[in-house]
Structures are given as C-alpha cells and as structure tokens.
Image: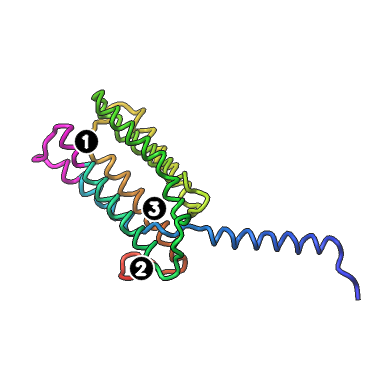
Amino acid sequence: MEAPSPASHVHDAIRQVRDLQRRVLEAERFTGYSGRSRAFGGTAALIAAVVMSRPGFPRAVEAHLAGWLAVLALAVIGNYSALLYWFFFHPTQKKEMRRLIPTVDAFPPLLVGGLFTLVLIQRGLYNLLFGTWMCLYGLANLSSRRVLPKAIWPLGLFYIGCGTAFLLVPGVSFTSPWGAGLVFFFGEWVGGFIFHYNRRPNAPLSSFFGAGK
C-alpha cells in the first residue's frame, strides 16, 4: 500500500487550519444587532422626512434639528433595547461582556459625529450636518467589520459616498429633509436585512416581518 505523499499531508494540514479558522470566525461572529430594530430606525427617518416636508411644519433649522434628534433617540432606544434583550435573554447567548465589544468599536466615530454636530451647530453650518452624519455613520458600520457580515462593508461605503456627495454638492439644505430621509431609510433597511440574516442565515424572507426572535 502506497504511503501518503508529503504533499497530501500539507494539503490536509492546510484544510484543517482553514476549518479551524472558519470555526473561530463563526464563534466570534456578532449576532447581537437586531435587523428589525435597525429597519425601524430607517422607517423613523422616512416618516420624519415626510412630516418635516409638510407645509405646516416650521422652516426654522431648530425645528428640523429637533426632528432629527427625535429620530436619533428612537433609533438608539430601539437598537440598544434589542441588543440588551439579546444579551440577557437569548437562550444560546453567553453572558460575557466581551461579547459586546463590537458595539464599543462603533463608539469612536459616533462620538466624533456628536462632537462635529455640536461644532457645526455653534457655527451655524447646519447644511453640513447631513453629510457629516452619513460619513461618520458609514465609518461606524466599518469599525466592527471583523465580526459583522461582509455585506456591512458596502453599506458603510454607501453611507460614506452619500455623505461625501451631501458635503460637496452645492445646494444641500438642512431644511430639505427628503434626501437624508431616503438615504437613511434605504441604508437602514438594507442593514436590517444584513443583521437579520446574520442571526438567522436560513430564515425565509417572511421571518423579517413576522413574529419571533
């Protein structure tokens, strides 16, 4: 009987290493973000755009800023409530704080976004807010790319691209909410589907809209 060649041993070793890498990546894959909660935030952005574009809504930038801050509050409450529920009550989730590290990775660009928002408001540069928000939110999407689905890459680039356009194209007005509303609606629904199928890879499309975890 012919003995296995050295090359076959090398191929077996490579296959075992790849299998180990795959298992490690699956173990580290973060499934804490709720796809439905993310889509809820996008829906809130679109509804806000509809409300703020109506003739009876005040044209003052302060009113529009309050509207977008309300959208932010709803999105934060919805997403992080779902995250905490997953962490404490999901039947297969280990209660280890290190499992929440991907959420911490997103904080730096979000905090910088908050700082830039304050600076732009102080200087009256409201028309730069949409582009700034989109660019930094895109970076937040990319910050946890090692443990999130690969599809989050193009989504992050989508936000950065839209933000760049909002910053560079003349005529962008903070009191014209439709552009930002549509960008965040589309982006958050796409992100919602990405996160939903990251948690439930083989689930049917109807599961995104139906009951269940």
Residue 206 % position (x, y) = 35, 68
Instruction: Assess whether residue 118 is covered by the magenta stretch.
Output: no
Label 3–label 1 contact, CB within 8 A: no
Residue 120 % position (x, y) = 29, 27
Secondary structure beneath label 1: loop
Tally of numbered discs: 3
Secondary structure beneath label 3: helix
Which color scheme does this rendered protein use?
rainbow
Q: Which residue is mark 2?
A: 213
Q: Is residue 150 left or right of residue 78?
A: right
Q: Which residue is mark 1?
A: 176
Real-space Cα distance between discs 3 and 2? 17 Å
- The amino acid type of the residue labelled 1 equals Ser
Q: Residue at x 46, y 50 (%)?
A: 152
Seen from this angle, which residue lies furthest bottom? 1
Find residue 90 and name its label: none
Foreground mark, 1 or 2, reads 2
Q: Which residue is mark 3?
A: 191
Instruction: Assess whether residue 58 is covered by the magenta stretch.
Output: yes
Q: Nearer the viewer, residue 164 or 212?
A: 212
Q: Residue at x 30, y 29 (%)?
A: 128
Q: Is residue 213 left or right of residue 105?
A: left
Seen from this angle, which residue lies furthest top? 123
Q: Which residues are magenta?
A: 50-67
